[in-house]
Every structure is written in C-alpha cells, then in structure tokens.
C-alpha cells in the first residue's frame, strides 16, 4: 500500500503544492524502495498508483484505460493507454505526462494509432506552452498557449488525469478532521490538448455517499468536477486507500468509469 507520506511527496513533486497531512512513514515504503532497487529504478522512483479503469456507456463495457503514475526524484511520470471498441468502431490512444520536481510541465505526449495515426506533443516554450500537432495526413501545426507551465493537463478520455486533479484539490483545499475530509470549492486552470483549448474547472467535495462497488457497499468521498461543457462525479477512497478514485460518472452521457 502506498503510504500517506508517499502520496504527499508525489503531489509536491507533480503539482508544486504543499503536501497532504501525513502521519509518517511505515515499513511499506521501505519495502517498496527495496523492490524498486531490484527493478533498476532506484530508491528515488515510486509507483503512486497503477491499474485500470473499465469504461461503460449505458451499462455496457466499451473500453479500458490502463495507467501508471510514478514519482521520481528528477521527474514524475503519468502514462496511460486506452482501448475502446463499441461494436461499430475501435480506438487506441496513449499519453504520457512528465512533470519536473517544481510541478512545471516538462512534456506531454498524446498518440493515436487506431483508427488513424495522429500525435500531439506539448512542451515549454520559454515561460509558456506550445503544442506540436501531427494530423492524420501528417501535416504539422504548432499551437501556442499563453499559459503558465503549472497549468493542469486534463485531456479527453484519460480518466487517470482526473485522479491527479483530485489529488491537487485535496492538497490545496482540504484537511482531514474527525476521520473525514473538510474541503471548500476550488477552481483550476486547465489545458485540454485534444480540443486545443484552455479553460477552467471547478472542483467541490459534496460529502460522503455509500455506493455499491463490485457488489460491495462502500462509503466514499463524492466530488463534483465541472467544466464549461460537462459535469463529472467522482467517488474517492479515504486516506487508508491513498485517496484513489474508485468510480467516475458523466450523467449527461450515461457513462461510468470504474476501477478494475
């Protein structure tokens, strides 16, 4: 299990924000570091979360996102692969986001291989951001953004990026009290690379809610995420489960995203 201190260190490195309230380091962190030594990643590398989300529309599973979020000494990396097949169309995409220890974006890459080959690469251009786009016909275009390097990347379809947004919200606007979170609403600037637009997102803790997850009732933190075009609902575990996102829903689209 990832410790609270590890989660806080990741947030500090990835988002350049103050850490979540933590209670110290336990033996799990030492064991994880030993495992990292065996894999050649070194003690400075820590997997914060990994796994997969099932993507459901109208109750039918149409795809899977497989993801890995890793904290490193020099760079933190969030990578993801999505495969969708709704019976009439297929899509395969991948993304990788690299963030410096001060929280600034170093590099974001998006690629599609099915049905068409496309690519977008976002990187710093002095103190701002530029997106290098390669279209299916292999024509190229650069799109500049007058945005700080600390802007949140929230791309279409990559649900693990919503989890990172939630961690940022928890780090900036929430404190644990009597075993529960106490949070106010917050607003963040975001960049949506697939739409080539910047915008804002509002995040708010709505309270506690008991839901059924794989046939088991669980009481989770319910968080609302609202952009200009869509509203998300996310159910987030407590500190003992490292504030992982367990379920997401987009009511307007009858879509649910559930951790496998």
Image (tube, helix red, strand yellow):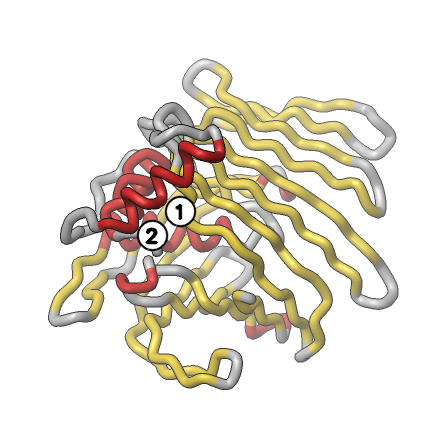
Name the secondary structure under disc 2.
Answer: loop
Residue at the spot 37% in from the left edge and 55% down from the top edge: 166
Decide: is 187 above or below 212: above
Disc 1 vs disc 2: Cβ atoms closer than 8 Å?
yes
Q: Which mark is residue 193?
A: none
- Which residue is tagged 2? 2
Decide: is 59 above or below 17: below
Sequence-first tag of 1 and 2? 2
- The residue lying toward the viewer, choosing from 182 and 81, is 81
Residue at the spot 35% in from the left edge and 56% down from the top edge: 1
How many residues crowd mark 2 within 10 Å: few (<14), some (14–19), many (20+)? Answer: some
- The residue lying toward the viewer, choosing from 242 and 41, is 41
Quarter in which the C terminus is drawn: bottom right
Pinpoint residue 55: horizontal percent, then vertical percent: 64, 65
- Which residue is tagged 1? 48
Residue at the spot 56% in from the left edge and 74% down from the top edge: 251
Q: Label 1, label 2: how many angstroms apart (C-alpha)? A: 6 Å
Q: Looking at the image, which residue sits at the far top?
A: 126
Pinpoint residue 214: horizontal percent, then vertical percent: 52, 80
Horizontal side, residue 256 vs residue 36: left or right: right
């Amino acid at each position: 299990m990832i410790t609270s201190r590890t989660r806080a260190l990741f947030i500090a490195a990835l988002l350049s924000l103050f850490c979540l309230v933590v209670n110290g380091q336990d033996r799990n962190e030492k064991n994880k570091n030993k495992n990292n030594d065996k894999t050649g990643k070194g003690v400075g590398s820590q997997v914060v979360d990994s796994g997969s989300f099932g993507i459901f529309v109208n109750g039918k599973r149409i795809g899977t996102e497989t993801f890995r979020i890793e904290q490193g000494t020099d760079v933190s990396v969030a990578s993801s692969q999505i495969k969708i097949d709704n019976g009439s169309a297929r899509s395969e995409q991948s993304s990788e986001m690299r963030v410096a220890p001060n929280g600034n974006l170093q590099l974001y890459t998006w690629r599609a291989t099915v049905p068409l080959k496309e690519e977008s690469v976002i990187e710093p251009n002095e103190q701002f951001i530029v997106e290098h786009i390669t279209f299916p016909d292999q024509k190229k275009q650069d799109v500049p953004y007058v945005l700080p390097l600390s802007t949140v990347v929230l791309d279409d379809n990559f649900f693990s990026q919503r989890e990172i947004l939630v961690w940022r919200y928890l780090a900036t606007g929430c404190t644990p009290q009597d075993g529960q979170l106490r949070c106010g609403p917050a607003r963040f600037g975001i960049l949506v690379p697939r739409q080539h637009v910047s915008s804002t997102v509002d995040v708010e803790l709505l309270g506690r809610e008991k839901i059924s997850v794989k046939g088991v009732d669980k009481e989770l933190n319910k968080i609302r995420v609202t952009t200009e075009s869509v509203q998300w609902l996310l159910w987030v575990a407590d500190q003992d489960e490292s504030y992982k996102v367990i379920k997401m829903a987009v009511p307007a689209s009858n879509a649910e995203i559930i951790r496998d």
